Amino acid sequence: MPVFSISTILQVVVALGLLNVWLVRSRSATSYRGGSARSLKEEFAAYGLPDFVFFFVGAVKIGSAIALIAGIWNESFVLPAAAVVAVLMAGALVMHVKVEDPPVRSLPAFLMLLMSASLCALALM
């Protein structure tokens, strides 16, 4: 039986956040979309990224979310998955700056970066 700790809570929050964005709300407009995008795919286009990057990043984020959930039972998944998410969230922040979004639009990516970096630090302890 897994022990519920700060790390476990962060794993679940990050994983569910990623799955929500990519599987539930990818076609929905939100106040956090970059540029004037009304969907996740439009957001990647607003950043000037080609379609294959959208599909690649989506697959990597969904895979990382699954790995974070699996990490509840097998801790060896946590560090690589959290590190990948942290790098992707840093990239998301750069993209928001690139299109000159107001800082509030970067808030989810910033929080996910903080949580992922915290998971990395906890995994290294």
Image (cartoon, rainbow, N blue to C red):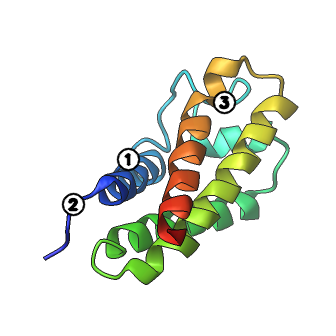
- x and y percentages locating residue 99 in the rendered image: 83, 29
Q: Single out the mark in the foreground, 3 or 2.
A: 2
- Name the residue located 43 percent from the left edge and 41 percent from the top edge: 25
User: Label 3: which residue?
Assistant: 37
Q: In the orientation shown, which residue stands out farthest toward the left?
A: 1
Mark 1 and mark 3: span between their CA atoms?
17 Å
Three-letter amino acid code at the position of disc 1: Val
- x and y percentages locating residue 11 in the rendered image: 38, 58
User: Label 1: which residue?
Assistant: 24
Q: Tag 2's secondary structure?
A: loop
Q: Is residue 51 left or right of residue 17?
A: right
> Which label's residue is closer to the chain start, 1 or 3?
1
- x and y percentages locating residue 80 in the rendered image: 57, 74
- Name the residue located 56 percent from the left edge and 68 percent from the top edge: 59
| 46 or 83, nearer to the observer | 83
For disc 1, the neighbor class at 10 Å (few under 14, some 14 to 19, many from 20) is: few
User: Label 2: which residue?
Assistant: 4
Mark 3 and mark 2: span between their CA atoms?
38 Å
Q: Tag 3's secondary structure?
A: loop
